[in-house]
C-alpha cells in the first residue's frame, strides 16, 4: 500500500510538472522574442508613426520575417497590401451653433476638401450618437461615417451628448491626421442644445499618401479556403514633437513614443507564431498572419483589410494587442475582449486545460475594448474576431507615453503568452473546432 501511495504521489507530481511545461518552455524561444521586440521598439524606429520612413522600415522587417517563416503573400504577389488615404491638416476653423462660437475642444472635423464653407443646418444630415458607446450599433455608426473607405453622399453632422466624455478627444486624435476617403465633410460636435442654425468655415491642407498592411499566408492542407487570422498593428505614435499622442512627454526628457507594448508586443507575437507554424506545416486550415498600419489614427489598416477579404471564409481572428506587461491576475494569464459574444474564448480555455495558463473574460467592459482594436471590423461582420491582451487599462502607466519601452516589459511572461496562443489555437487550425459567429447588431 505504501508503494502504491508513493507511486500515486509521484504520478501527480509528474503530471503537474508536464502541465506546467506545456506553457513554460515548449514553443517560442525567448531570445527570438527579445530580438524582434528590440528592433521594433528601438529609438531608431522613432515610434513607427504612420507615413514615416520608420514605419516603412518596420514593414520591410516584417516582410523579411514572414519570408523566413515560409509564408506566401496573401494578396496578389506582394506581402504589402498597399492603399491610399488622404491626410488633411486643419489650418483654421470657426464653428457657430445657434449664433454661438464653440471652442475647439467641443468639435472636430473630418474632410477631404481644402476649403469648407457651410452656413445652413440644411447643409448637413444630422446623426445622433448614442450615449451607450458600448453597443455595436454606435460603433457601426461611427465607423460608417469616419472610416477611410467611406464615400459619403452628403455632409454629416454627428451630434455627441456632452455626457459622453472623452469621445471628442479620442476622435480629435484620429482627425489630427485627418484621414478621410471622400470629398464631403463630417462635423462631430458636442452639444445637448436644440440646433436652429450652423456656420462652419475651415481651411484644410489635403494630401494623398500611401501606406500598407503586411499579410502572408500558410495554405491549409485540407481546408485552404477557411482562414484563421493572427493579427496586430505595427504603427505607433511617432515622437513628441509631431505625434497625436494622448499624453505629451515632459520637456527635456525622452520624446520618442517607442510603443514597445503598444503594439510591438503584438507584432512580435504574430512574427513568432508565423515562424512556429511555418516550421510545422501541419495546418489543415489556412493561416493568415497580418500586421496592420494606421491603428493609432483610426484603425484604417484593418478597415481596408476587412473590406478586401471574404468574411464568410474567416473562421476566427486572434488579434493580439499589448501583451508585454502582466495582467491583473499576474503571470501566465491574459484576457479576451468580447468573451461573451461567441464561444471563441471558451474553446481556447478548454484547449489550455492541461496547462498552467488561463484566459479570462475582459475585466474592463466599461472601456468597450472589443470595438477599440483591429478585431472590430470583422467582428461587426459576424466573425468571431477577438483581441487577446494583458494590458491593465485602469492602470497601464506607460500607455501612450515615451516610457513604453522594452525595459518595462516582462519578456519571459510575454513569451509564455505567445506559447499559450499557439497551443490554444491548434484545434481551430486543425479544423476540429469552429467557434460560433458573433451576432450582428443592427444600427
Image (cartoon, grey):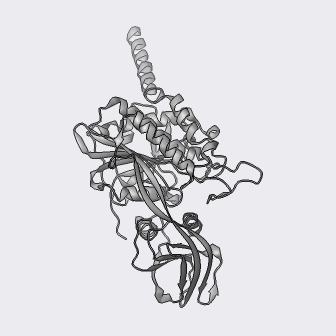
| Residue 396 x %, y % | 61, 49
| Residue 308 x %, y % | 34, 57
Which residue is at the front of the view, 162 or 360?
162
In the rendered view of the protein, which quadrant contains the C terminus? bottom left
When the figure is inspected, residue 108 is found, relative to residue 350, above or below; the finding is: below
Please indicate, yes or no, whether residue 160 appears anywhere in the rendered image.
no
Residue lying farthest to the left in this orientation: 222
Which residue is at the front of the view, 270 or 61?
61
Which residue is at the front of the view, 370 or 251?
251
| Residue 324 x %, y % | 55, 41
| Residue 176 x %, y % | 58, 65
Residue lying farthest to the right in this orientation: 252
Please indicate, yes or no, whether residue 105 appears anywhere in the rendered image.
yes
Q: In terms of image quadrants, where is residue 380?
A: bottom left
Q: In terms of image quadrants, where is residue 348?
A: top left
Q: In terms of image quadrants, where is residue 101?
A: bottom right
- Is 350 on the left-hand or right-hand side of 156? left
In the rendered view of the protein, which quadrant contains the N terminus? top left
Which residue is at the front of the view, 42 or 390?
42
When the figure is inspected, residue 288 is found, relative to residue 130, above or below; the finding is: above
Q: Residue at x 32, y 58 (%)?
A: 382
**What number of labels is visible?**
0
Amino acid at each position: 500500500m505504501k508503494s502504491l501511495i508513493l507511486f500515486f504521489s509521484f504520478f501527480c507530481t509528474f503530471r503537474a510538472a508536464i502541465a506546467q511545461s506545456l506553457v513554460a518552455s515548449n514553443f517560442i524561444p525567448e531570445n527570438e522574442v527579445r530580438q524582434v521586440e528590440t528592433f521594433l521598439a528601438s529609438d531608431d524606429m522613432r515610434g513607427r508613426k504612420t507615413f514615416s520612413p520608420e514605419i516603412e522600415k518596420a514593414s520591410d522587417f516584417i516582410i523579411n520575417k514572414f519570408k523566413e517563416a515560409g509564408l506566401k503573400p496573401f494578396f496578389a504577389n506582394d506581402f504589402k497590401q498597399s492603399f491610399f488615404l488622404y491626410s488633411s491638416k486643419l489650418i483654421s476653423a470657426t464653428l457657430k451653433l445657434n449664433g454661438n462660437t464653440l471652442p475647439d475642444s467641443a468639435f472636430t472635423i473630418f474632410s477631404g476638401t481644402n476649403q469648407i464653407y457651410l452656413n445652413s443646418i440644411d447643409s448637413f444630415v444630422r446623426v445622433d450618437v448614442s450615449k451607450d458607446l458600448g453597443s455595436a450599433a454606435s460603433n457601426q455608426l461611427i465607423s460608417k461615417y469616419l472610416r477611410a473607405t467611406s464615400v459619403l453622399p452628403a455632409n454629416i453632422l454627428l451630434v455627441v451628448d456632452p455626457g459622453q466624455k472623452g469621445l471628442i478627444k479620442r476622435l480629435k486624435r484620429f482627425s489630427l491626421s485627418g484621414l478621410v476617403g471622400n470629398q464631403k465633410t463630417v462635423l462631430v460636435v458636442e452639444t445637448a442644445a436644440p440646433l436652429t442654425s450652423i456656420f462652419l468655415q475651415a481651411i484644410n491642407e489635403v494630401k494623398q499618401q500611401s501606406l500598407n498592411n503586411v499579410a502572408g499566408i500558410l495554405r491549409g492542407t485540407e481546408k485552404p479556403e477557411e482562414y484563421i487570422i493572427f493579427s496586430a498593428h505595427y504603427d505607433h505614435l511617432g515622437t513628441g514633437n509631431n505625434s497625436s499622442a494622448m499624453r505629451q512627454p515632459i520637456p527635456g526628457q525622452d520624446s520618442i513614443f517607442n510603443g514597445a507594448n503598444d503594439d510591438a508586443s503584438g507584432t512580435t507575437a504574430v512574427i513568432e507564431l508565423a515562424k512556429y507554424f511555418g516550421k510545422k506545416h501541419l495546418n489543415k486550415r489556412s493561416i493568415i498572419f497580418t500586421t496592420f498600419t494606421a491603428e493609432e489614427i483610426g484603425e484604417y489598416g484593418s478597415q481596408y483589410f476587412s473590406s478586401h477579404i471574404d468574411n464568410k471564409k474567416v473562421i476566427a481572428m486572434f488579434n493580439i494587442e499589448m501583451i508585454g506587461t502582466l495582467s491583473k491576475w499576474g503571470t501566465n494569464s491574459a484576457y479576451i475582449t468580447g468573451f461573451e459574444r461567441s464561444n471563441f474564448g471558451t474553446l481556447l480555455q478548454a484547449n489550455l486545460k492541461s496547462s498552467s495558463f488561463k484566459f479570462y473574460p475582459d475585466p474592463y467592459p466599461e472601456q468597450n475594448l472589443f470595438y477599440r482594436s483591429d478585431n472590430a471590423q470583422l467582428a461587426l461582420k459576424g466573425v468571431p474576431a477577438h483581441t487577446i491582451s494583458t494590458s491593465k487599462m485602469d492602470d497601464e502607466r506607460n500607455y501612450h507615453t515615451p516610457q513604453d519601452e522594452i525595459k518595462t516589459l516582462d519578456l519571459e511572461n510575454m513569451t509564455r503568452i505567445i506559447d499559450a496562443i499557439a497551443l490554444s489555437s491548434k484545434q481551430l487550425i486543425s479544423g476540429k473546432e469552429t467557434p460560433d459567429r458573433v451576432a450582428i447588431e443592427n444600427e
